[in-house]
Amino acid sequence: MITFVLNGELVQADDPSMTLLDFLRLKQGLTGTKEGCNEGDCGACTVELAGFEEGALKHRAVNACILLLGQIQGKSATTVEALDGAHPVQQALVAHHGSQCGFCTPGIVMALKTAQREGRQDYEDVLAGNLCRCTGYAPILRAAKAAAEVPVPKGPDEAALMAGLSEGGLTDVDEFATWYAQNPDATLVGGATEVGLMLTKELKQPPKLAFLNRIPALQNIGHEIGGMRIGSGVLLARLRGLMAGKHPQFGEMLRRFGSVQVRNSATLGGNIANGSPIADTPPPLIALGASLTLRKGAARREVLLEDFYLSYGVQDRQAGEFIENVFIPAQEDTLGVYKISKRFDQDISALCGAFNIGVSAGVVRRASIAFGGMAATPKRAKAVERALIGQPWNEKTIAKAQLAFAADYTPISDQRGSAQYRLILAQNLLKRYYLEQTGAGRVRVVGGVA
Amino acid sequence: MSASKSTPHDSGPAHVSGAARYVDDYPLPESCVHLAFGLSEMAHADFSLDLAAMRAAKGVVDVLVAADLPGINDVSPSVHDEPLLAVGTVHYIGQPMFLVVADSHLNARRAARLGKVEYTEKTPLVTLDQAIEADSTFGEPLSFAIGDAEGALAKAPQRLSGEVEIGGQEHFYLEGQAAYALPEEGDIRVVSSTQHPSEIQHKVAEALNLPFHAVRVETRRMGGGFGGKESQGNALAVACAVVARRLNRPAKMRYDREDDMLITGKRHDFRISYQVGFAPNGRIESVIFEHFVKCGWALDLSHPVADRAMLHADNTYHLPNARITSHRLRTNTQSNTAYRGFGGPQGILGIERVIEHIADALGLDPLAVRQVNFYRAKGDLTPYHMQVEDSISQELVEKLAQSADYEPRRAQIAAFNAASPVIKRGISLVPVKFGISFTLTHLNQAGALVHVYSDGSVQLNHGGTEMGQGLNTKVAQVAASVFGLGVEAIKITATDTGKVPNTSATAASSGADLNGMACKDACEKIKARLVAFAREKWGGEVRFGDGQVQVGTRSMRFAELAAQAYMARVPLSATGFYKTPKISWDRQKGKGRPFLYFAYGAAISEVELDTLTGENRIIRTDILHDVGNSLNPALDIGQIEGAFVQGAGWLTIEELRWDDDGRLLTSAPATYKIPCASDTPDMLNVALWDGANLEKTIYRSKAVGEPPFVHGMSVFFALADAVAAAGGDRHFDAPATAERLLMALNK
């Protein structure tokens, strides 16, 4: 039985694999939350979810369509119905003609409402996960700015309501490790941004689900000598904050990873373990020399992330084994990360390239370059690295090294880009990196890190 | 007067609170069944079905194949070539083959995948080239001409030829297709997310062998339509009606997003080839266009769409000699359908490419070539022999170029580009002239039904549908204006075939023009009765305003007059009707006046292009648009802003891709990308042209739904300008994805 707070009242549900959206619409009759795509790409189902993070109550906008009830045990969900129509965001949207057909509107209300509570004013990012086909967004952005001028209304005391509720199920990482070793056929649910699709699109019904967000230990972030250890359950939203300070271009890439709603659900471990060749965190992590702690029962082992990916869909992870944490070695920041997609925000990459090149006295001393979208797995560009190391850091070297990409990668053509396009991009991104590192002025139209 | 005020959308408060109901939001009885189609996995094949496993699946109540249908197996809006369920042969991947009825939406979807299908594959025609090669067409090509196109081309001082491919577009209405049906004592009631309730009524009646009067269709609102709900809702409504009657239970169907994108038609992809002859100043002397239109597997609305493309092959330009020929190709892909602009934008892109090509050849600013070709204010003939009587392109473009500093910014951009090796900027001004009226003349009619109750409140119904555009608000403003009331005194109810019959689709931007006039007619009938009654009872002049009625020297509330009129047995209900005057059109001859008037506008966009990746941004867009005397400036500006972004999306990031087998690869929002908030210009200035419609439309306003969609083209040609600035080939195809731009840069 799942127990959580819904619009200020305790509710119970029995099927942990049911999506919150279906629960709202079919079981509670709360039809204000809309189904636009049923895959986390349109934001019409946005609700606010509150939970304790590092001891404090934190509110996050999430997509209810791919959020499973098992993930919100003990948390507090707020839907558009909880607002009385007088919320500053609602009033501003009416006054600024921010709704036309109105179908995306409840999701936009909840995205902006949560942003207002959190004091965010980066509205284009806040709304990157909310598609509107009618307005062209201009009146919605006007409304968002107007609403920011109005004080945040007080809601119910969610902390008090949640006080008696447990996380439920397996919450201790050691107990979980034992259980998973014995139940290797279970489907691990990090943020369900992938598993959710398995349920809503592939219509699969996995017999056993394990909800990792209930395990606090997987959300730890440890600063150690020699680097940073990040729990596999850490949300990408938190990772973005962490990386913005250490490796700003990684942080900037994460700004464009999915959307606010997706980053508020998806976890670092999920993005890595899923093994997609177009996952966006592996290229920069590989370029940074990151390694994984894999755990099965009590046994742990360390694997370099670049060695984790064996072939398409196959990773170096045994049955019953899970990623406990990711270690990023401390280093000088020379990381460049470039995500290329058809649309800037909330789009799956055609490719994502990461460059980590060290130069001293005008000569390349170290180079670690990794790409997603160029091979069957996230993969290093070792031929390019070889063409750089020991060479003078100049345009001639770059031009020569660009040619080596063809030795490293034989990309495929698909709906996100042709093989030829991908190869030219990879070559040009090395040039972009060179121009950025050598201070040649603006070389990108979005997200340049000064 | 209520009309001309920026009244907010009447559903605004319900939208923001989640109270606004869409088809899927209505509570239905527990007995309601849910439907899903089983879809073809082959683009062209004969098939046989084994549905035993499905019938036994969890929650399944019934399964229907074509043979189970009680009436006509057709959901086409035109020529009865589109079966609800395929018979023997499938014609595209995504075609409905059978219908699953289950106790829940999820169980119906799950069961639909259990159908065992045996296919005998035939060769599919997926691309335009394959269809051309196989001569797979819907009828003979249509052609019309003015002057001596071939002769003038041969004599022209300079000549060019070229070709442009134009991609289609997925509607991506946020609310997917949905309908439900309730059995009612032998009759049937359907609630549908449709732009065309009357057509749903007709298709349901045909499918059930019922007269139209036994089928009632209601539409409260759609969560977006854009043309995608003009005919594409037929299948769901008919399926629900058939099942509701068969089982005597309520039946509901909504497409999951991916099913929606696989099943339904989209904007037509075009190839336009051209030959143009012109003078050294860029003046076009003759142009010959060939349109190749990808219609998909069934006809749907392809003929009128392709016709409208031909009718917009001139855009704002006078073409003294021209021939336009249109080939309508049949392919094994989704049956393309209406989409905002209805072929007009594709036709316009053809002539705008010609203009750009001429400017490029002559080394002129494309704006100069545009200006030298504009229609004069009146007197010039279009290629379809209609006299243009209302052209304002020249003044409008001059005003916009001034207010947006086009010339100084051109110079600034040149300076920027000279100093910036990687990032290049570009700018473009694209005008629009868009013909207003259905080209099928009989569709230009509308009805309304107005009731004044004895408490003075007014209930209004009209044949138009609300899909977000604010039609109901505008029509309510019309009623409020006639009665001198505030708009809050008017209630508009769901569109209902039982209230206003024989309606046309809410399409062709015609909603306010037609229904506003019909509403005015109805309101004026009632008003005339009230005036006659008041005159007779109290004497003197009768005037309405501010909720009051002035009768001679006495003043009373409108409500009081209504109550008195009721007591005196004055009928307080009326129907209204409107038909568009002046229009006539012979599409075979290519002659006539298909449009009552034209709506005009222009947009200037400036973009920034990364020459290493093809990534780009819109820095600034300025739009000046002609809505005549605006019925509601806020709603009109909302239409313009939204249409611009949708148009820019069509020509930049929105890319439909099929594989060689005919499978749509971009069948979900994960792969098909519509613009999001950050894809809009950093600066967007929209202004309304100050001038009334010369024609006697509703309060001299102009239609606004489709014309501003063309403003997105300014982004496409600004990108061409930036590509040219980097030394690339500016004549690339649409959409201008980052990939296509990078390839054009490297060409």
Image: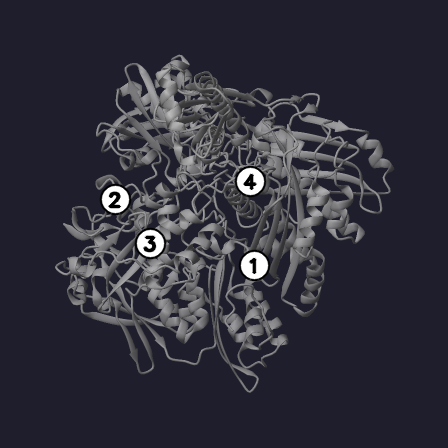
Q: Residue A99 location in percent, x, y? A: 42, 45
Contact, mark 4 vs mark 2 (Cβ under 8 Å): no
The answer to whether residue B730 shows anywhere in this view is no
Label at residue B168: 4
- Amino acid tagged 3: Thr
Q: Secondary structure at mark 3?
A: loop
Within-10-Å neighbours for mark 4: few <14, some 14–19, many 20+:
many
Chain containing mark 1: B
- Amino acid tagged 1: Glu
Q: Is residue B669 left or right of residue A185?
A: right
Q: Which residue is mark 2?
A: A24
Label 3 – label 2 distance at C-alpha: 19 Å
Q: Secondary structure at mark 1?
A: loop
Chain containing mark 2: A
Viewer-closest of A330 and A183: A330
Q: Which residue is mark 3?
A: A193
Q: Residue B323 location in percent, x, y? A: 75, 31
- Amino acid tagged 4: Gly
Label 4 – label 2 distance at C-alpha: 36 Å
Can you tell which of label 4 and label 2 is closer to the viewer? 2
Within-10-Å neighbours for mark 2: few <14, some 14–19, many 20+:
some
Q: Which residue is mark 1?
A: B615
Q: Is residue A262 left or right of residue B78?
A: left
Q: Secondary structure at mark 4?
A: loop
